[in-house]
Amino acid sequence: MMPRIQCEVKVIYHTILIGMADKTYQPTLAGLRAFVAVANKQHFSSAATTLGVSQSTLSQALAALEAGLGTHLVERSTRRVLLTAEGMHLLPLAQVVVEAADAFSTAAGGVADPLHGSIRLGMIPTVAPYVLPTVLAGLTRQLPTLTAHVVEDQTQRLLAALRDGALDAAMIAVPADSDGVTQIPMYEEDFVLALPPGHRLAGKRQVPATALAQLPLLLLDEGHCLRDQALDVCRRAGVSVELADTRAASLATAVQCVAGGLGVTLIPQSAVAVEAARSRAGLAHFGAPRPGRRIGLVYRSSTGRDESYRRLARIIGELVVAEQPVRLVTDGADGQR
């Protein structure tokens, strides 16, 4: 009788052990891109072409990733490439990282160009009501990827918001006394004299600025740059004006007060069509040299986006000039920073 031989059979279940040789190792994006490309193409040459790198560069990036992780991700042969069990386990995570990096780069491209995405654009009250429809419609046509969010406020508050980062750019009268901003003149316009109905100067086209000395001048409230500009017109003409008792918070109110006989006021040429249509005020034009103002685009000098904002200023200027009796300014930035 043959002796009984006892045998012990051990069944070994393989598990995936993924360990890093260096616990401080951080995979590079180049290595993860190489791994994902090889996994997708299952061919080193095709993967290298997809990434726009040489095959040796691809192989080095993948080898460095495997060395850092302390595991093989792919099986290499002369005919094909197969993922290891570890590679199959890690591939979805690598794909997530690569896709997130691509999304980040795409988003950063939009952020880097202020003419893509959204822009917070400030406007002073004596500009916004009269050019806003033209500007918004024109920007939609010419910059379809840009969405403008408009903030109307007085000059100093706009400049403060600009410096604080609450605004990206603003349309104000220039030059403005403010450090840290670049000012690009866009267009200039004349001031027109608004008069009570039936005034002896109504309809005149060569009124000297010195005529303001005999007229009660109605001004906007403190803080409006048009108030300061009106006073500057009087100063340049060498006249001491009689200020009307009435003050207005808006140009529309000022013109209505004028129509009611409470004084005269200066309005920018771009506002004439709107304000004349809704009031009975008379109008007179100054003789040369005609007083007026320049409207420009201002933005923080520290943005480093001069080219984009110059393009925006040019587009806005051309849009306004096409619709309003104003003159395009082409002499570039004032250079005030």
Image (cartoon, rainbow, N blue to C red):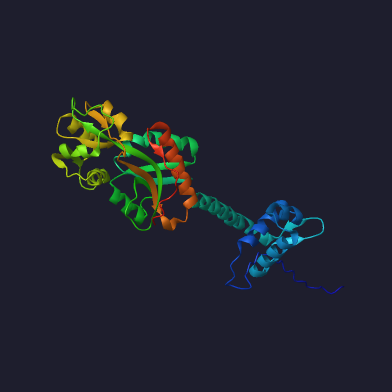
**Which of the two residues, 156 or 147, is positioned nearer the viewer here?**
156
**Which of the two residues, 176 or 252, is positioned nearer the viewer here?**
176
Task: Check the image and report above or below for 126 versus 113.
Answer: above
- Left or right of 279 on screen, residue 170: right
At a point 22% along the width and 44% down the height, the residue shown is: 234
Is residue 258 visible in the rendered image? The answer is: yes
Is residue 168 visible in the rendered image? The answer is: no
Looking at the image, which residue sits at the far bottom?
3
The answer to which quarter of the image holds residue 53 is bottom right
Residue 272 is situated, as x and y percent measured from the top left of the image, at 30, 31
The answer to which quarter of the image holds residue 313 is top left
Looking at the image, which residue sits at the far right?
1
Q: Quadrant of the C terminus?
A: bottom left
Residue 103 is situated, as x and y percent measured from the top left of the image, at 55, 51
Task: Check the image and report above or below for 233 versus 67.
Answer: above
- Left or right of 72 on screen, residue 332: left
Looking at the image, which residue sits at the far left?
245
At a point 33% along the width and 55% down the height, the residue shown is: 178
At a point 63% along the width and 67% down the height, the residue shown is: 18
Residue 116 is situated, as x and y percent measured from the top left of the image, at 49, 45
Residue 330 is situated, as x and y percent measured from the top left of the image, at 45, 44
**Which of the two residues, 256 or 110, is positioned nearer the viewer here?**
256
Q: Quadrant of the N terminus?
A: bottom right
Q: How many marks?
A: 0
Task: Check the image and report above or below for 156 versus 270.
Answer: below
At a point 42% along the width and 46% down the height, the residue shown is: 119
**Which of the two residues, 152 or 75, is positioned nearer the viewer here?**
152
